[in-house]
Image (cartoon, rainbow, N blue to C red):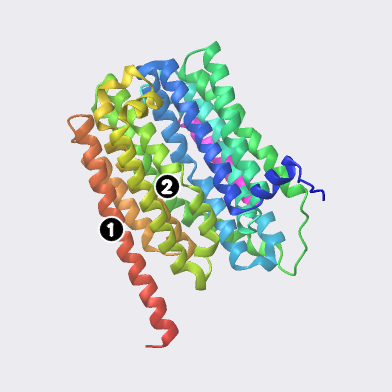
Amino acid sequence: MTTTSRPAGSRISRLLRSSAGIAIAMAVMNVGTYGFQIASARLLGPGQYGALAGVMALMLVLSVLQLGLQATSARRIAADPEHVAAVEAAVLRTGWRTALALGAVTVVAAPLVTRLLRLDGLLPAVLLALAIVPATVMGAQAGVLQGERRWLPLSLVYLAVGVPRVLLGIAFLLVWRSESSAMLAILVSTWVPVLVGAWALGRHPRRETEVTEAEIRRDVLRETLGSSVALLAFFAMANLDIVVARSVLDEHDAGLYAGGLIVTKAVLFLPQFAVVVLFPSMSTGGESRAAVIKGLAFLGTLGVVGVVATYFLSDLALVFVGGASYAGVQDRLWLFATLGALLSLLQLLVYAGLATRGVWTKYLVGVGALALVGLGTTASGVTDLAVKVASVDLTVLLVLVALQVVRHRRDDDAITGS
């Protein structure tokens, strides 16, 4: 009796076509992204890395249009799969237009960014403006793939985000150790997932429907802007603390805070695949409640594990942060892991609001972002700033949980007619 084994490539392809494949691809993406940050922290040192961290945090804030486009197209396709061709055309056209507009505005604002983040020159801010163009386009492409639950090509897009960044980043920094070199690597690597996304969409022609692109383009733009406002508020909460740190702390302490935020971002983004996989279900009425509960339980458990692991393995965590240069923050890394856990839960609830086109989510998170900046400017040190940021995150999280309870209870009442 003979047995045949499937080729390794076939098994890998089958895995990447599943939701588990998204988890693996996003894990690789995040490992690549934070591998780049770890390498940058080691090669640049606290002073220069603090400046780079500020630029990258601003890039994440500017990426809200990318995520808004992704959320809009994924929600619309999941809720109305018959009109994929029209949604795709509208989203891609809107993506290119908004990307070019955002890039132009960011170029104009480059002198202000340079002054705000105390950069050594104008070049890092200009490179940031150029990099935001392909990043925004990628969001439109990824949203179509996510809405159709085409996990294999979406996995390839995510792999193309992380792997080139860490490889090119290390190569560029070994040649020229500066924040400009790091941002040049980000600019080049950000075009790779755009090429992968264009290839994936081009290989899967859509069936035309009676609904045309022009009929839905305006609604797509309106929803994208609404989603982007909510995501802007969230990313402001997740990233403006480093800008505050650069403003109120001295350069060394700001660099230590930036090093601690590597742990925060790892805890926040490593389980991000759960949001990607659950979002189409959160956009469907019958699946929404179960998806939110499942997500909160999963991310909450991972967050607790991350905080405990960071507390007891702070020596190991310090290696990933940047080594002995960041020893001054080692005993507080568990606090930065707590920030990541809170932000992970906040992110899920923000997307839950977007999935149902909720209005209040963006206002609540926006108030939280303003409170974070206002309270953060009164901080006297690294620990004080981290504690104040955590208190704002926790408050907004509890309010959003209450909002979800009220929303689902209202939906139940509407179904039962009571």
Give the mark, 1 or 2, whose residue is nearer the N terminus.
2
- Say what secondary structure mark 2 lies in: helix
Q: Residue at x 27, y 38 (%)?
A: 335
Q: Is residue 415 visible?
A: yes
Does the magenta segment cover residue 101?
Answer: yes
Q: Residue at x 65, y 42 (%)?
A: 156
Amino acid at circle 2:
Leu
Report the residue marked by disc 2: 232
Q: Residue at x 67, y 55 (%)?
A: 88
Taking depth in this image into account, of 177 and 365 the one nearest to the observer is 177
Disc number at residue 398? 1
- Taking the view exactly as shown, the residue that stands out farthest to the front is 1
**Quarter the C terminus occupies:** bottom left
Question: Where residue 176 appears, x then y in whole percent?
Answer: 52, 12
Disc number at residue 162? none
Asked if residue 246 is positioned above or below residue 74 in the image, the reply reads above
Q: Which residues are magenta?
A: 91-109
- Say what secondary structure mark 1 lies in: helix
Taking depth in this image into account, of 391 and 128 the one nearest to the observer is 391
Dividing the picture into quadrants, the one containing residue 314 is: top left
Question: Where residue 87 appears, x then y in whole percent?
Answer: 66, 59
Asked if residue 123 is positioned above or below residue 99 in the image, the reply reads above
